[in-house]
């Protein structure tokens, strides 16, 4: 990193562009209406003033000051205060038609030198460009902005370009070449839901580690660089959450919020895993629930997915901080007999030949758990293991029966489905009460509900309590 950087105010974006925009650069922010250009630019200025002590000027050609201030307030941007503190100026230029390029320039320059601004936003360049007849004038304007503002004052400048709906190109030609950076903001669909992303097309002197990055305007703009596992410095004992009336807490406050307090008693949940998602990653969403059961002295029965051996399930359970003695009492892990294992008290061996015989043994063990704890247990079943052992039809039959038993005992079931079986996903969708899916996009981890339907949510790892929990942010 040779050049000074100006933080964009968006951590996830800074991460993929070497810490921020090159200092004193001109960046084009293009996109259709409603894609988040104004909110992003507001954040850039707000963050600069509050965290970096850099004053900023917002030049707006289409929105009056009052509207802007009111619109930005819900995102936590108090521009009135910044203005009082002399760190911000809003230049309202609604009557641009009558102004000439030099007069516009002079007005902007005056504001900039007035507060020694280091950051400038022009919203939007398209509005000024329309006011001029010849493309030649537009070029002159950009050149002047570049030479007299950006370079002379070292003022990092965002120039917003409105792209009309339906336009194939950004409507740009030489602007792209003159500018130091070019980012396209998009609002598209992913899995039938709103997904927002930035495509970084150009950033001078910068190694762009990820040229597409998802974001949300929730909380005043947050971008999501590829999912990162966070190290846990000091392990803590899992703190169980109370169960709301008629429900089981998921063990995570964030997930509970998504499901209106938790999973209904007697219900079953299908957690479908998309491509390129590691065990560690989906465990982020899965693990808090068994931890919550164990932490409250309830039983947990696990039939692991292929590739997850009983040792791993055991280790995961130990990570919750529960003493091993209590785990031996509360946890049961199913394995098929031909797998050679040490005989541990928490292992339930199944034959893997006769489905009815296995189910009988399985239910017996569940019954034992209920008697021992006086609580209905959580049952976690790797659907792919059932399919591998029996057949698709038998696997569905088993899951149907388990679902009925869970409903009767008012317990909870979580079925895990790995990628590559869309037909099984469809069949199970009809069986379960809740259907969630995890996917990856631009390296970030996302979760959404098919049943009940939810918007997309970014998933990050929170280790602030000494154990991994999901941090969930909706795409808005
Ligand atoms: N005050 C607000 N509260 C909630 N949503 C808002 C608010 N202001 C804007 N939005 C939404 O945020 C999205 C991006 O807005 P904006 O940054 O103004 O887009 P652009 O400047 O690209 O047209 C839009 O979908 C808009 O509906
Ligand atoms: Mg706008």
Image: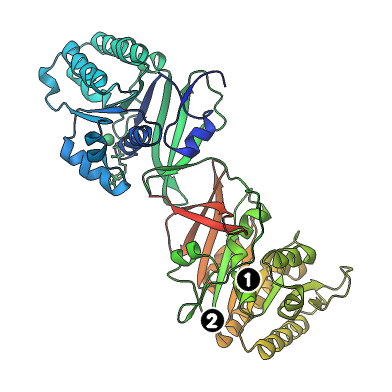
Q: Are marks 1 and 2 in contact (CB under 8 Å)?
A: no
Kindly identify the residue that appears in the image at 62 percent across and 58 percent down: 466
Query: Left of 60 or right of it: where is 253?
Result: right
The furthest residue to the front: 85
Res 154 quadrant in image: top left
Query: Left of 352 or right of it: where is 411?
Result: left
Name the residue tied to disc 1: 290
Pick the residue in front: 120 or 393: 120
Can residue 422 be seen at all in this image of the molecule?
Answer: no
From this view, report whether residue 406 is shown above or below residue 196: below
Kindly identify the residue that appears in the image at 47 percent across and 22 percent down: 202
Pick the residue in front: 271 or 356: 271
Specify the label residue 266 is tagged with. Answer: 2
Q: Position of residue 51 (x, y in %)?
A: 40, 36
Mark positioned earlier in the residue sequence (1 or 2):
2
Specify the label residue 327 is tagged with. Answer: none
Res 136 quadrant in image: top left
Kindly identify the residue that appears in the image at 67 percent across and 59 percent down: 235
Position of the N terminus, as image quadrant, is: top right
Q: Position of residue 251 (x, y in %)?
A: 55, 68
Can residue 285 be seen at all in this image of the molecule?
Answer: yes
Judging from the image, what secondary structure is the residue with disc 1 in? helix
Pick the residue in front: 59 or 258: 59
Judging from the image, what secondary structure is the residue with disc 2 in? loop
Res 160 quadrant in image: top left
Colour scheme in use: rainbow
Pick the residue in front: 316 or 268: 316
Count of labels in the image: 2
From this view, report whether residue 260 is shown above or below residue 454: below
């Amino acid at each position: 990193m040779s050049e000074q950087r100006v933080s964009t105010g968006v951590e996830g974006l800074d991460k993929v562009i070497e810490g921020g925009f090159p200092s004193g650069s001109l960046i084009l922010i293009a996109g259709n209406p409603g894609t988040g250009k104004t909110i992003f630019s507001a954040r850039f200025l707000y963050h600069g003033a509050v965290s970096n002590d850099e004053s900023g000027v917002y030049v707006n050609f289409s929105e009056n000051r009052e509207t802007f201030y009111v619109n930005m307030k819900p995102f936590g941007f108090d521009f009135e205060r910044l203005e009082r503190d002399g760190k911000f100026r809003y230049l309202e230029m609604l009557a641009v038609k009558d102004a000439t390029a030099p007069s516009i320039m002079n007005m902007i320059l005056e504001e900039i030198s007035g507060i020694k601004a280091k950051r400038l936003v022009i919203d939007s360049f398209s509005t000024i460009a329309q006011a001029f007849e010849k493309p030649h004038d537009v070029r002159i304007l950009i050149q002047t902005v570049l030479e007299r503002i950006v370079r002379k004052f070292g003022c990092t400048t965002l120039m917003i370009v409105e792209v009309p709906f339906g336009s194939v190109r950004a409507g740009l030609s030489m602007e792209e070449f003159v500018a130091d950076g070019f980012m396209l903001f998009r609002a598209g669909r992913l899995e039938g839901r709103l997904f927002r992303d930035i495509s970084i097309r150009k950033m001078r002197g910068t190694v762009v580690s990820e040229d597409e990055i998802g974001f949300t305007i929730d909380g005043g703009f947050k971008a999501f660089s590829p999912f990162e596992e966070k190290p846990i410095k000091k392990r803590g004992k899992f703190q169980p959450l109370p169960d709301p009336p008629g429900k089981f807490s998921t063990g995570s406050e964030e997930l509970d919020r998504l499901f209106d307090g938790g999973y209904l008693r007697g219900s079953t949940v299908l957690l479908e895993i998309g491509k390129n998602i590691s065990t560690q990653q989906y465990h982020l969403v899965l693990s808090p629930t068994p931890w919550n059961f164990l932490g409250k002295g309830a039983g947990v029965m696990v039939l692991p997915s292929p590739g997850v051996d009983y040792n791993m399930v055991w280790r995961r359970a130990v990570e919750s901080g529960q003493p091993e003695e209590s785990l031996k009492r509360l946890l049961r892990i199913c394995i098929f007999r031909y797998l050679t294992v040490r005989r541990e008290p928490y292992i339930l061996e199944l034959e893997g030949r006769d489905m009815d015989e296995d189910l009988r043994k399985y239910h017996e063990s569940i019954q034992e758990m209920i008697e021992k704890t006086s609580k209905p247990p959580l049952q976690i079943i790797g659907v792919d293991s059932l399919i591998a052992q029996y057949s698709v039809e038998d696997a569905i039959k088993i899951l149907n029966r388990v679902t009925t038993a869970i409903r009767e005992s008012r317990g909870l079931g979580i079925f895990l489905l790995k990628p590559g079986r869309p037909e099984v996903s469809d069949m199970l969708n009809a069986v379960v009460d809740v259907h969630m899916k995890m996917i990856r996009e631009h390296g970030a981890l996302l979760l959404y509900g098919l049943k009940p339907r939810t918007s997309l949510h970014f998933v990050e790892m929170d280790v602030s309590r000494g154990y991994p929990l999901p941090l969930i942010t909706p795409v808005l």
